[in-house]
Amino acid sequence: ARRLPGFKEAHLARFASAMAMLLRSGGDLPQSLALASEMETHPQVAAELRGWQQRLAAGHGKPGDFASNSRCFPPLFNWLVAQSGENVADGFSRAAEIYARRAAYRIEMVLYAALPVAILVLGIMILLHLLPLLGPLVQMINNLGGE
């Protein structure tokens, strides 16, 4: 599901929102990352978060430092978090807001692309159900006109 348009952005928005909430409720960054990595269902993302914890413990305290060279989190996400400076909760909150909007936009685009196809399929289904009725109707009209 993460490969479909909008779903990866939605996952990033949920993650960023959860991190912002954890940090604002009094948790520190290492504890919040530990909890997020334990709760993460995607193994690559969980491994990435554990890597963030290790870099944070090694002294890379800024988001731009501990979240660099990420495979699971796009550069825009890391940049948004890093732009907050010392207040990482605001960075995660901003990332959650932007990625939630991106997810909604991409999911709408997929739905708008699928709508014409759905209408076409529905029209074909209606036509296929009406075809057996058209034969006897045409024959009846021909019989009425032939008398």
Image: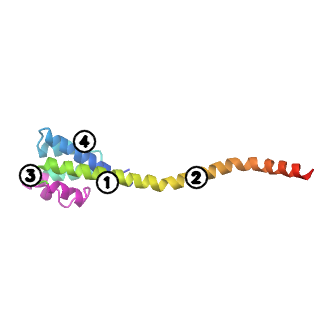
Q: CA distance from mark 3 to mark 4?
A: 25 Å
Amino acid at circle 2: Val
Which residue: 11% across, 38% down? Answer: 26
Say whether residue 63 is magenta.
Answer: yes
Residue 117 percent location from the top left of the image: 53, 55
Looking at the image, which is closer to me, 140 or 90? Answer: 140
Amino acid at circle 1: Arg
Q: Earlier in the sequence, mark 2 or mark 3?
A: 3
Q: CA distance from mark 1 to mark 2?
A: 29 Å
Mark 4 neighbour class, 10 Å CA radius: few under 14, some 14 to 19, many 20 or more: few
Residue at image mark 1: 102
Looking at the image, which is closer to me, 23 or 138? Answer: 138
Task: Please state which of the two labelled residues, at mark 3 or mark 4, is closer to the viewer.
Answer: 3
Q: Give the side of residue 75 with respect to residue 105, left or right.
A: left
Which residue: 24% across, 49% down? Answer: 96
Q: Give the side of residue 81 with respect to residue 123, left or right.
A: left
SS class of the residue under badge 4?
A: helix
Q: In the displayed image of the protein, which residue is found farthest to the left?
A: 59
Task: Say which mark, if any, is on residue 145.
Answer: none
Task: Say which mark, if any, is on residue 121.
Answer: 2
When asked about the image quadrant of residue 69, the answer is: bottom left
Say whether residue 71 is magenta.
Answer: yes
In this picture, which residue range is highlighted in magenta?
54-83
Q: CA distance from mark 4 to mark 2?
A: 41 Å
Residue at image mark 3: 86
Q: Earlier in the sequence, mark 3 or mark 1?
A: 3
Query: Circles 3 and 1: CB distance less than 8 Å?
Result: no
Residue 28 percent location from the top left of the image: 11, 43
SS class of the residue under badge 3?
A: loop
